[in-house]
Image (spheres, grey):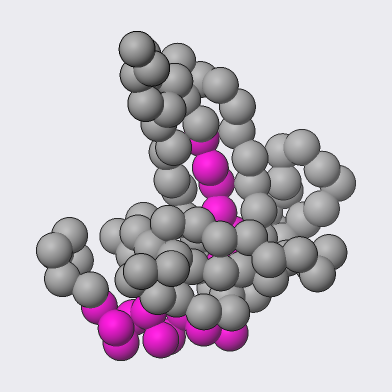
Amino acid sequence: MDDDVWDSDFANDLIGCTLLVGLTFVDHDEQLVRRQQIFGTVLSVQESAGIVIRQNNGEDFTIAPVLDAVEAADPGIYQLADEDDVVEDPDFTALITVRSPLRS
């Protein structure tokens, strides 16, 4: 996908699907700060508001609207690193790196 073009068809296709997201947080020097995994059902996808995911605990989590990071998931069981939760056959996965800005 072209970074400059919003794919509204793909965005609409994500709604109602299960999305497993791996977030990597790094500082301005690219040093790992922490990792987080979340998963749930996609509630909405908007270019201006991001991708809203309803987690199994009922809480909503919003990620950046980076459709290029979203890929069809391979079938299987995905073990979440920090928890006992497993995700079986998610529809899509996304890997996103969150960089902290350099503070002066």
Residue at horizontal 80 percent and vertical 69 percent from the top = 58
Where is residue 12 shown, x and y percent of the image?
41, 86
Does residue 17 appear in this view?
no
Does residue 53 appear in this view?
yes
Where is residue 7 shown, x and y percent of the image?
25, 78
Please, is residue 19 above or below residue 14 in the view? above
Residue 86: name its quadrant.
Answer: bottom right
Where is residue 70 shown, x and y percent of the image?
40, 62
Q: Which of 103 and 91 is in front in this view?
A: 103
Please, is residue 38 above or below residue 26 in the view? below
Name the side, left or right, on which 54 lies relative to 25.
right
Name the side, left or right, on which 62 lies relative to 82.
left
Start-end of magenta stretch: 7-24
Name the side, left or right, on which 80 lies relative to 69.
right
Q: Does residue 14 show up magenta in the picture?
A: yes
Where is residue 38 shown, x and y percent of the image?
66, 53
Residue at horizontal 60 percent and vertical 33 percent from the top = 35
Residue at horizontal 30 percent and vertical 60 percent from the top = 68
Residue at horizontal 72 percent and vertical 38 percent from the top = 81
**Image quadrant in which the C terminus is located:** top left
Q: Which of 22 and 3 is in front in this view?
A: 3
**Image quadrant in which the N terminus is located:** bottom left
